[in-house]
Amino acid sequence: MQDAFIPLLLGAGIFFLFTLWRVRPLFLLKSWRTKRRGAAGALREIQARIAAAADGRARAIALCDAADIVAKRAAGKASAEGLYLRATRSDPTSADVVARAVSGLARRPRALESLLWRYLATVRWNDSATATATALDALRALYEGPLRNALRARALANARDALK
């Protein structure tokens, strides 16, 4: 073999390995479809619960269940945020709904920040003091942690203290 063929064979080998890497999901497609069908079935069941909910509290719990499933997807951030927002609108006085939204979007601090500010803007703080306090505490923790804004964290701590 001549020395000129060695780079050619090396390039062909790298291209072959790259091609195998790119079509790798085709081999795993069956297990991926099975997982997706299970999640889709669970979402259909929860959507039926949402439609059949008698009151705002039951609807909010069903919406939180749906958001928990959607939040686990890689591309489900916007959908989960929308479902949590609908849940907070269905039952604005529930601290449990706010806590579930905080735990569901904990890995997405910007989405959680947006949701909590929207919640605080739409609800009357005196009507739902525990839910408002939960939202204020979560925002304060966000600004002390991943979002790093000490001034906002102190302002939210003062708002939380004034709420008491």
Image (cartoon, rainbow, N blue to C red):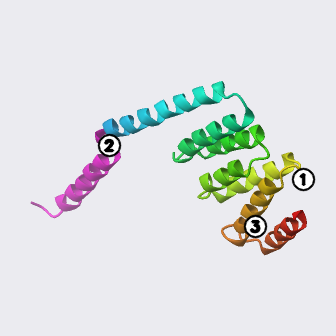
Write down the region rendered in magenta.
1-28
Q: Earlier in the sequence, mark 2 or mark 1?
A: 2
Q: What is the CA distance from the residue labelled 2 to the residue labelled 1?
A: 56 Å
Residue 11 covered by magenta stretch:
yes
In the drawing, what numbered circle is on residue 23? 2
The residue where tag 1 is placed is 126
Whole-number angstrom distance, CA of label 3 to CA of label 1? 19 Å
Q: Which residue is mark 3?
A: 140
Residue 122 in the image, given as x and y percentages of width and height: 85, 45
Disc 2, disc 3: CB below 8 Å?
A: no
> Looking at the picture, which amino acid does disc 1 mark?
Asn
| Residue sitting at x 76%, y 53% | 116
What amino acid is labelled 3 in the image? Arg
In the picture, the quarter occupied by the N terminus is: bottom left
- Residue 146 lies in magenta, yes or no? no
* Nearer-the-camera pick, 8 or 46: 46
For the residue pair 25 and 157, the one nearer the viewer reads as 157
Q: Is residue 5 left or right of residue 143?
A: left
Q: For numbered disc 2, what is the local secondary structure?
A: loop
